[in-house]
Image (tube, coloured by chain):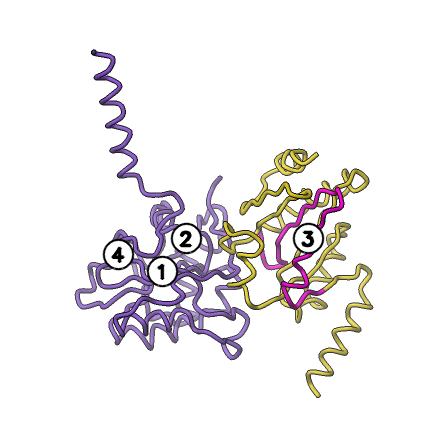
Amino acid sequence: MKKLMTLFSLLVAISVSMAFTPASGGYKVGDTATDFSLKGVDGKFVSMSDYKDAKGFIIIFTCNTCPVVKQYEDRINALHEKYADQGYPLIAINPNDPSIQPGDSMEKMKVRAKEKGFKFPYLFDAGQTVYPQYGATKTPHVFLLDASLIVRYIGAIDDNARSAESVGVKYLENAIAALEKGKNPDPNFTKAVGCSIKAKA
Amino acid sequence: MRKLFLLLAFCLSIQLTGQDVVVFEKFDDFEELLYKDDGKTYVINFWATWCAPCIKELPFFEKIHEKYKDKNVKVILASLDYKEHLERKVVPFIKQKGLKSEVVLMDDPNANVWIDKVDKRWSGAIPATVFYNGKNRKFMEQEFSSFEELESVVLEFK
């Protein structure tokens, strides 16, 4: 009987732990994202809860060093210009470990932010705790959240990394437009080539 | 006119290189490389000259080519560089590193469609590698830390 009880409590423990362990691979569309508190290039910590009136959040995992990112920097600036005032603050997070990619240190982030005139928070995922929760695997990697921090779109900014002029579909902008109309973004998940996130094996 | 000129320059550039780099502008043309059924084990590594971890692991793929090229293993290094960078970046890189494996350039801008066609599990981050022999297939979105690690995967197909 005692053995049976032990077995039973073990089963309960397993099922409870399974229920509370987030699915591996990070968020899927429909999941609720966790807020964070990460330090930015201006030395201040930023959380989504700082934005009381936000209608949503454009979270972009990005870095200083990835050539794909560099092709998007001007477009990321433009997205901030366009959407911050509409209630969708853009928050950039560098997930890379600078001990592997020295070009992605906080000091270098400050330099890049100044060079490119970033007006949005550019945060450092110190300890690499945030990007695995989101399931970011590369830079750039976009997560669009709504006001309740529900993930509504994951993927690419648009369908042409090489040139802004050749873009056919603005996935992220279309997704925001859908939220504005109270609709679900379609597509709500896209893929693009990017740089792997640099982490110790 | 400008397009014609670019095309001409482009054809010429391929001829001038020591190693012919086949350029695929459409994934549909590239796709057959992922489904050959000739008894060989194919190792198809997606990389780019701008991808530091990719460059780091290239010597392991070169060593696979060297050691197994006469043992039914074919290594294909599929560069995701832009075709405009073929002459200026990719070809000089091949020469500088003395790459012996076959290099192809895959430059279909519609990544949202073709990434899934390579493998549903691929997020699009590089490096990434497809291994297959006939119906047996393995996809790995990761960087190999040693030749032995890569070789052990290749040997699963022997």
Q: Quadrant of residue B68?
A: top right
Q: Nearer the viewer, residue B72 or B102?
A: B72
Spatial CA span between label 1 and label 4? 20 Å
Please, what is the three-letter code of the amino acid marked with disc 3? Leu
Residue identifier under label 2: A136
Spatial CA span between label 3 and label 1? 31 Å
Who comes first in sequence, dot 1 or dot 4?
4
The subunit carrying tag 3 is B
Residue A84 versus residue A34 in the image, above or below? below
Q: Which mark is residue A81?
A: none
Spatial CA span between label 4 and label 3? 43 Å
Magenta region, residue range: B23-52
Query: Where's the N terminus of chain A, which quadrant?
Result: top left
* Point 45% across, 55% down: residue: A104
Are both tags, 1 and 4, on one chain?
A: yes
Q: Which mark is residue B77?
A: 3
Are both tags, 2 and 4, on one chain?
A: yes
CB under 8 Å between discs 2 and 1: yes
Magenta stretch encompasses residue A58: no
Residue identifier under label 4: A45
Q: Nearer the viewer, residue B118 or A161?
A: B118
Are both tags, 4 and 3, on one chain?
A: no
Residue identifier under label 1: A143
- Residue B4 placement (x, y as % from top left): 73, 83
Q: Is residue A37 visible?
A: no
